[in-house]
Image (cartoon, rainbow, N blue to C red):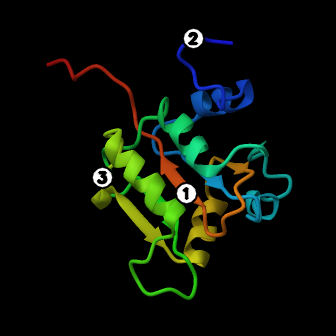
Amino acid sequence: MLKGIDPVLTPELLKLLCEMGHGDEIVLADANFTAEALAGEGSGRPVLRLSGVGMQATCQAVLSVFPLDSDVLQPVGYMQVGNQPPGYCSELQRGVLARMEQDGVAGPAQCEPLERFAFYDRARRAYAIVQTGELQPYANFVFKKGVIADGLRP
C-alpha cells in the first residue's frame, strides 16, 4: 500500500499510467465493452480489468494521478448514448463529467461526446483499455495524457 494513492489504482494500472507518454490515450470502459477485440489480438496493447469497480470510482482514481493534455481542445471523450437526442447524457455520464469539473480536472468544453463507432475507432488506437465492472451501458470514456513539467526556461 502507498499513502495518498487511491486503492483502485492497482500496481498494474499505475505502471501502465506511468509508461504512457504525452498524447497517448487510455480508454476506461464498462463491463460490456468489446475490449479484447478493439485492443487487437497480438497488438501488445494491454487490456486491464477492474472487475469489481464502477466507472465513477475508476475515473476519479485515474484522474487523481493522470494529467490531461492541455494542448488539445477536448482531451476527454465519452460514448454517446444510442437512440437519444444530441446532447443527452446518462446519469452516470453526468456524474463523471460533474466530478471532473468539481475537481478542476476538465470543464464541459473539454469533454467531447463521440458516436459509438467513432468511439470504437478511437479505442482501437488507444494505448490501453481498462475494463471496469460497470454495468451501465455507454459508460465509456477516453482520456488523452498531458505532461507534468516545470515552466520553460528562457
Of all residues, the one furthest to the left in this rendering is 154
Name the residue: 66% across, 64% down. Answer: 136
Mark 1 neighbour density, 10 Å: few (under 14) some (14–19) many (20 or more): many
Give the label, 2 or 1, closer to the camera: 2
* Quadrant showing the C terminus: top left
> How far apart are the alpha carbons under marks 2 and 1?
27 Å
Query: Residue 119: x, y in percent?
Result: 57, 69
Q: Report which quarter residue 123 is drawn in.
A: bottom right
Residue 9, relative to residue 154: is it above or below?
A: below
Q: Which residue is at the front of the view, 55 or 80?
A: 55
Q: Helix or strand or loop: what does disc 1 sit on?
A: strand
Q: Position of residue 11 (x, y in %)?
A: 72, 24
Q: CA distance from mark 3 to mark 1?
A: 15 Å
- Residue tagged 2: 3
Instruction: Give the CA separation, mark 3 to mark 2.
Output: 28 Å
Label 2, residues with CA under 10 Å away: few <14, some 14-19, many ≥20: few
Contact, mark 3 vs mark 2 (Cβ under 8 Å): no
- Residue 92 is left or right of residue 129, and the answer is left
Point 33% across, 48% down: residue: 101
Disc 2 residue type (three-letter): Lys
Contact between labelled residues 1 and 3, with CB atoms less than 8 Å apart = no
- Closer to the camera in the image, 90 or 15: 90
Q: Could you tell me residue 65's position as x and y percent? A: 49, 29
Residue type at numbered disc 1: Phe
The mark found on residue 107 in the picture is 3
Give the amino acid at mark 3: Gly
